[in-house]
Amino acid sequence: MKISNFILFVFLLFLSIGYSQKTLSGKVMNSANEPIAKAKIFLDSINSKVVTNRKGEFEVSLPEKVNTINVYSNEYGLLSSKFNNETVMNFMYLESETSQKKKSKKDDTVSLGYSKVNQKYEANVKQSMDTEKVVNNYRSIYELLRGRLPGVTITRDNKITIRGTSSIRNISDPLFVVNGMIVSSIDYILPNEVKSVSVLKDGAASIYGAQASNGVILITTK
């Protein structure tokens, strides 16, 4: 009797797991009905690590609560659709979408953030600079960075501004994060110590809270 109860318990356990683990499949196409490969699938703002294959197809496992399915292509930009417990969802980029696309380079990191102003998800591209490809003959960290990070302006007195950011406080400096630690200044960093530099803004910088309203400069040292 005990053995039969145990078998029944195991059966019900596997049955419940099967029902709780939902999957979503679909295709991503362009306006010419051609498949789009390597498009990233986001569940709300979370990168599922799933990308479309060369036929534009994808299949992704879903957690319990998902409100929006987002598709991001480096070539075509972002598409979003409300999720209503479908098992199949297909996405197509229209000409109007591609004309407003936000391209990113192959090595750029893309994250999604929800814009309360525009009331929609927006793609944020983390621009990076690999300093190992730069000759280390600079006198300061500011000389190293000046003119090498798109959207970043560094004045003669070494004030850094990230274009496209706004702050409720009248402080132009971004937040500095060195090796994962928030610092008040990067003056002490020697150019030949720098391994890589990245820029975050908008939704991508939101993980650092209100203090990152002017964007974030991420620096990793060797």
Image (cartoon, grey):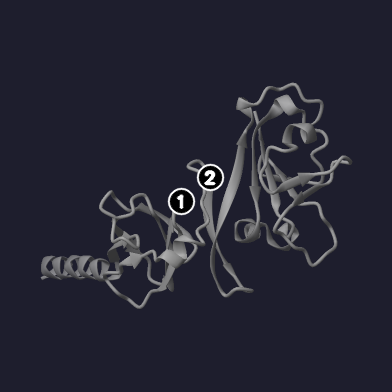
Residue 209 is left or right of residue 157, and the answer is left
Could you say where residue 109 lies in the image, as x and y percent from the top left? 53, 47
Looking at the picture, which amino acid does disc 2 mark? Asp
Q: Residue at x 82, y 43 (%)?
A: 185
Q: Label 2, on which residue? A: 108
**Snapshot quadrant of residue 212:** bottom right
Q: Residue at x 28, y 64 (%)?
A: 26
Please tell me whether mark 1 sits on a helix, a strand or a loop.
loop
Which of the two discs, 1 and 2, sits closer to the camera?
Answer: 1
Q: Residue at x 65, y 26 (%)?
A: 134
Q: Label 1, on which residue? A: 74
Quadrant containing the C terminus is top right
Q: Residue furthest right?
A: 157
Could you say where residue 80 lies in the image, as x and y percent from the top left? 44, 68
Residue 154 is left or right of residue 125, and the answer is right
Q: Residue furthest bottom?
A: 84
Gap in Å between the C-alphas at discs 1 and 2?
9 Å
Could you say where residue 67 lies in the image, as x and y percent from the top left? 43, 74
Q: Is residue 30 visible?
A: yes
Q: Please determine whether, in this image, residue 222 is positioned above or below residue 215.
A: above
Number of other residues with Cα within 10 Å of mark 1, as a class: few under 14, some 14 to 19, many 20 or more: some
Pick the front one: 72 or 112: 72
Quadrant containing the N terminus is bottom left
Looking at the picture, which amino acid does disc 1 mark? Asn
**Disc 1 and disc 2 in contact, CB within 8 angstroms:** yes
Please tell me whether mark 2 sits on a helix, a strand or a loop.
loop
